[in-house]
Amino acid sequence: MVTPAELTASIAAAAGSVLETMFFAEAEPGPSVSEEQRHQMIAVRIGFDGGLRGEFRIGFEPHLARALAAAFLGIDESEVADEEVNQVICETANMICGAALSRIESDEHMRLEMPALTDNTAECAEFLQACFVTPEGAICTGVRIE
Amino acid sequence: MAYRVLLVDDSPAMRSFIRRVMVLSGFDLDVCVEAGDGAEALERLRQEKVDVILTDINMPCMDGEELLRRISEDPELRDIPAIVVSTDSTKPRILRMIGLGAQGYIAKPFSPESLREALEKVLGCQV
């Protein structure tokens, strides 16, 4: 059975790897964000099952989301459409969630639901929370295992 | 030699990223055909000849696993090499996709070098 510490470490490693490899960006573990910051975040939800069953959520501060989209698409931030920001954020969430679970459950079958934008970024006691900071803004992740 | 590539991913952003990485890596891209899921990929394969297929797994309508199964059953398509590009890097999934005929497997996140190496290996070329 995976422990909360193992899960948090896996998400941190996956987030770091995705940001560095795909965006040439760096993220470090950071403090929990304020409620106001959390409400402004662009958030994505992904359900998963297999060896583990549960839900992954991730929120990006808007400026960071736009900067990531621009870096991913190789265009200037001013040229990035809102729809493109959403696509890149969903894909980023998918990569972080998939990489984190693959690290923990490498010998198990895994199935991820399609990433979906959600407005629910509220801090929730049943979710294991971890936040990261980048020069462009904060990222908050939450995972709940059933 | 310039290559014709079919990119299959439900995320237009990921398709754009892969296309850009291929070009920046020096890969000689003649035509890049794109599809948002397995069903659309099969339709495009019947219209266009390609040298290699890069496909995601987790997609709506028809996923990458079913796409590879259909390709392996089609005498006109089964010789086209396929490389899987997926967030799922669990051993059972990799073995299943290789069993369905995938000649390469790239786990997301991936570096430009790993994409280039996989293409070189499958196409037998030096990019």
Image: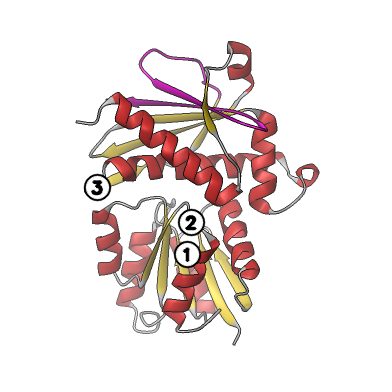
In the image, taking residue B101 as reference, residue B120 lies left or right, namely: right
Q: Where is residue B70 in the image (x, y as percent from the top left)?
A: 34, 70
Q: Is residue A30 visible?
A: yes
Whether callout 1 and callout 3 share a subunit is answered no
Q: Is residue B69 magenta?
A: no
To which residue does mark 3 refer? Answer: A109
Query: What kind of residue is marked 2?
Result: Phe
Q: In this view, does B36 lie to the left or right of A98?
A: right
The magenta stretch is A119-145
Query: Which residue is located at x 47 percent, y 15 percent?
Result: A123
Q: How many marks?
A: 3
Q: Residue placed farthest to the right in the image?
A: A78
The numbered disc on residue B114 is 1
Q: Where is residue B64 in the image (x, y as percent from the top left)?
A: 39, 60
Q: Name the residue under label 2.
A: B110
Tell me which residue sits at (22%, 46%) in the image. Answer: A108
Q: What element carries label 2?
A: loop
Q: Residues within 10 Å of mark 2 (few under 14, many from 20)?
A: some
| Quarter placement of the N terminus of chain B | bottom right
Which chain does tag 1 point to? B
